[in-house]
Amino acid sequence: MKAKLCSTFWPEKGSSKTFETLLIQTKDEYSETHMKTFNLSVTENKKVNQTVLMHFHEWGDSNQLPEYMLDMRASIKVQYIRSSKKPGANTGPILLVCATGITKCAIYATIDIIVSRMTEEHTVGFKETMQAIKSQRFGCFRTPAPYLSAREMLMKFAVSTGVVHDTAIGDKPKQQKSKYSTLVRATKSGFMRKKKALGK
């Protein structure tokens, strides 16, 4: 199910829209399986900037995380690198927009942060990242479904890229208590009691 938009701030290819001091023109438009890419020219006070807008129209309003999330992230990175090399390109941060400003943006941000940590630092920190984003964006994970889907997707990415070995997957075995360590603790505590008794 495609995400429906009542209106867009970007115009159709070859046309323009004006918002007070801003003039937005769509220079080019490219269609792919899950998205459309628009090359925009933004003019303000005679200063012209070039930027790219990527509309992922296949990600509907359901709680289900699309399987192409990692492809979506790669597409954004590639487009950002390409556009930043053009003259007059906008090299600012990537701006994410969704209907509520929390749900889809938070899911994408979580996956982007964790994949970056995997490739650069070789660490995962899935639980910690989710907790940090939840504290910054209240209500972003309303059901367990996006959490579980993202965890499964990132686990597959970690194994396929060699960041995490396959032996790390699964339940951790319960640590058995050593009789020796129990004996040592008992001996120490008994020794301490005797020492205190002698001191009195």
Image (cartoon, rainbow, N blue to C red):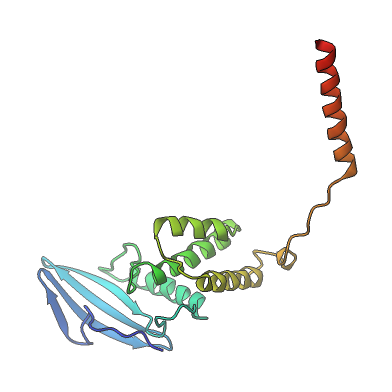
Q: Is residue 48 left or right of residue 105?
A: left
Quarter containing the N terminus: bottom left
Q: Is residue 8 visible?
A: yes
* Residue at the image point whose x is 12% and y is 76% from the top: 18
Question: How many circles with numbers are drawn on the protein?
Answer: 0
Up the image or down, 7 lies above or below 20; here it is below
Residue 101 lies, in percent from the top left, at 34, 68
Dividing the picture into quadrants, the one containing residue 190 is top right
Residue under the point 41% across and 85% down: 58
Residue 156 quadrant: bottom right
Q: Residue 24: x, y in percent?
A: 18, 76
Instruction: Please state the horizontal and vertical placement of residue 183, each as a whole percent of the image.
Output: 89, 36
Locate residue 2, reporting x and y percent: 38, 88
Q: Is residue 198 above or below residue 85?
A: above
Residue that appears at 41% across and 72% down? 104
Is residue 85 in view from this perspective? no
